[in-house]
Image (spheres, rainbow, N blue to C red):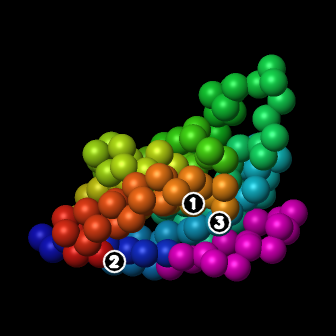
Amino acid sequence: MNDCKCLICNVNQDNSKTIKPIFQKHKGINIMYTNTDVLHNKLEELELIAIQEKADIIAITETLLKNMPADTKPEDFVFKIKGYNSILNYNGRGLCFFLKENIEFIHILDYESYFKTSIFLQIKNSDCNLTLGLIYRSPNTTQQENYNLIDLMVLLQIKINL
């Protein structure tokens, strides 16, 4: 079985009120990425798009409120889509992966220790082991966090030949 990698990038954010996903099919897995700029009020729309486009994996950045009310904790936001497992990261603006329940995966926490606003998964597929990473770098990232992200990229280059 081969090791595979998949990189999905979105560099054009327009602060839209609707979801504008990017799709990529990789080794028979339909992967969707979007930046929701707050997910809780777009979850139904996301679910409809996922069903319509037959998304197997959904990767989302900016799931949380930009200015969280003082009496609200990030963990108060639980995102679920029927038929999908969710992997959440509450750091920064929040990240989330939704994976169809029939997809086997391993959550790789080692990589996430380098850069706190990231999620890494190893997807088990009959064709290959697919490593997926979701990283959100805020415009307010500190210099040290930038160095940590560079360290992570170097590590990924060595480990999975990114």
Which quadrant of the structure image shows residue 71? top right
Residue tagged by mark 3?
34
Position of the C terminus, as image quadrant, is bottom left
Q: Nearer the viewer, residue 51 or 26?
A: 26
Q: Which residues fall within the magenta stretch?
A: 9-24
Identify which residue is drawn at 70% across, 79% down: 12
Q: Which residue sits at x=67%, y=61%?
A: 139
Whether residue 97 is visible here, answered yes or no, is no
Residue 68 shows in the view = yes
Secondary element type, mark 3: strand
Q: Quadrant of the N terminus?
A: bottom left
Q: Write down the residue under mark 1.
A: 137
Which residue corresponds to the image point at 81% horizontal and 74% vertical from the top-left?
14
Vertical relation: 153 (above or below) 73: below
Task: Give how far across and how far down residue 108 sits, in percent.
Answer: 31, 47
Which structural element holds mark 1?
Answer: loop
